[in-house]
Amino acid sequence: MKTNTKTRFVALMVLVALLGVVGCISVSGTEELSQTEIQHQDNWTYTSSFLSSDGTREAGAYVVVGSSDNTCTVKLEIWHEEGTDVDEISLTFDPMLSDALALLTPGGYLSPLARFERTTDGQGVVYTIPHAGFQGTGTMVFEFLIRKYFVASPEGQTRLHIDFTVHNGGTFSNTTKNGEGDIYFRIP
């Protein structure tokens, strides 16, 4: 009877070890996504997609710029393929004075680590979410308010630089995808 119990225990330990080895040799990697040309649906709406190396659309950005007397709004939606999650995202408005930009609606729950900061050259503002958590499971929606007279762009054009990382995690694979691109828009 004791031999049978020992045999079962050894067989169980071998099974656990094999499962651990399979987990360690799972496929993982990083892929850089390429940004498509920006599509102007009208004067104030911009879209762009991010493609994998085989041309599959993995994520997209949709920007709508609105205006009132002294302010304009910039609504940004970042969507990504089902089965992927956004890990981190960074949005840079350049040129932009730090007092000109505010976040109206974060879309979902705020990350406690989200922050605004100046660019290293002091000419722009960066909004960063270093760990998106629950907010990164679906389409991310942001609405920013810009005070028009505090924008530091003589041409009236602002660059929105989008930098994000998504991952898909399967049983035997975990692939990270990095997307980075620019959308230029005019402040009305």
Image: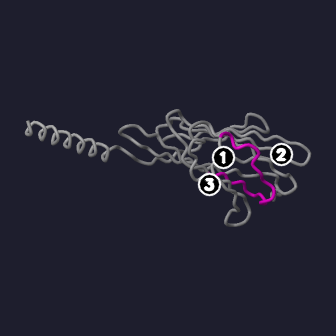
In the figure, 57 relative to 129: above or below? above
**Kind of residue indicated by mark 3:** Leu
Relative depth, front residue between 151 and 35? 151
Q: Which mark is residue 72?
A: 2
Please name the residue shown 77% across and 45% down the image.
104
Relative depth, front residue between 187 and 102? 102
Extent of the magenta region: 90-108
In the figure, 96 relative to 10: above or below? below
Instruction: Report the residue that reaches farthest toward the right.
Output: 69
> In front: mark 2 or mark 3?
3
CB of mark 3 within 8 Å of CB of mark 1? no
CB of mark 2 within 8 Å of CB of mark 3? no
Quadrant of image for the C terminus: top right
State how far apart marks 1 and 2 are (Cα): 22 Å
Percent x, y of residue 82: 52, 32
**Kind of residue indicated by mark 1:** Leu
Percent x, y of residue 158: 76, 52
Sooner in the amino-acid sequence: mark 1 or mark 2:
2
Q: Mark 3 points at which residue?
A: 113
Please name the residue shown 82% across and 54% down the image.
155
Quadrant of image for the N terminus: top left
Sooner in the amino-acid sequence: mark 2 or mark 3:
2
Percent x, y of residue 84: 51, 38
Element type at marker 3?
Answer: loop
Relative depth, front residue between 13 and 123? 13
State how far apart marks 2 and 3 are (Cα): 26 Å
